Image (tube, rainbow, N blue to C red):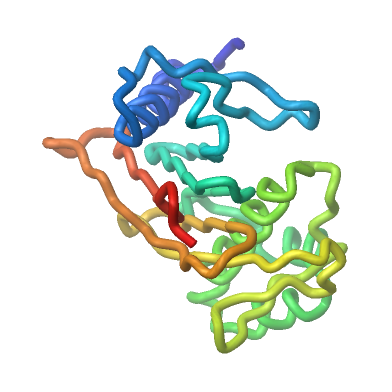
Amino acid sequence: MGFVRPRDRAQFIASRALLRRALASYGATAPDGWVLGVNAVGRAVVEAPAPWRALRFSVSHADGLVACAFAWDRELGVDVERATRPVDVERLTRRFFPPAERARILSAPADQRSGRFWRQWTLKEAYVKALGLGLARSFSSFSIEPDRSGYRVAPREDGGAWHFLSARVAGTHWLACCMGGGRARPRLVLREPPTRSALEPVAVELASPGDS
């Protein structure tokens, strides 16, 4: 894998290191003792140790922040984006989001539109990663709507129940997690390094092994 910027390479390495350290915290296996593979749909999975094959994980990194999400025997996705980088909110919203989401973003005061855009973008990205579809699912084909329990997907074509978490992290990033099934609610755990650096690792734990 090639990287144009040294920073991108450093961030990729940091994301893999954080993933292995987080995996090691679940069992008596050193970070380099975990064997990772890819399943039939291209999703990264645990192959060894065998008792931990049901542990699901998702990794995302964006310009200075790395996030890992974990769930026990439930599909999930995590996405993080730097919310301070300039984007053409109106153009991207009209291109990628259906009418309900466009109205919610573009009706906001000008100084709030960027935040609403990135919150919605990360929620949708986390959902398609949880489905294992990636770019195969068009963002304009579904909405993620707020409701009394958090968020819901409309239309709900996949037939599953999903839990969402959305948060502003470190004052510079939006982070979203999506986890399928069960009654456990998403939980956000921040793990900061001893000294603040350009790469600030964040681990997001959605469900501990054995949670119902």
Q: Residue at x 19, y 37 (%)?
A: 193
Give the residue at x 67% y 81%: 104
Q: Position of residue 89 (x, y in %)?
A: 65, 63
Q: Quadrant of the N terminus?
A: top right
1 relative to 173 in the view: left or right: right
Picture layout, residue 156 above or below residue 34:
below
Q: Residue furthest bottom?
A: 148
Q: Position of residue 42 (x, y in %)?
A: 74, 28
Q: Nearer the viewer, residue 51 or 205?
A: 51
**x and y percent of residue 20 in the render?**
39, 25
Determine the image quadrant of residue 123: bottom right
Residue at far left of view? 194
Observer-nearest residue: 31 or 134? Answer: 31
Relative height, residue 117 to residue 34 (above, below): below
Side of 193 where 150 appears, left or right: right
Q: Say if 88 sits above or below 42 in the image.
A: below
Q: Residue at x 68, y 75 (%)?
A: 152
Q: How many marks?
A: 0
Q: Quadrant of residue 211?
A: bottom left
Horizontal and vertical percent position of residue 66: 41, 38
Q: Residue at x 39, y 31 (%)?
A: 23
Q: Quadrant of residue 31?
A: top left
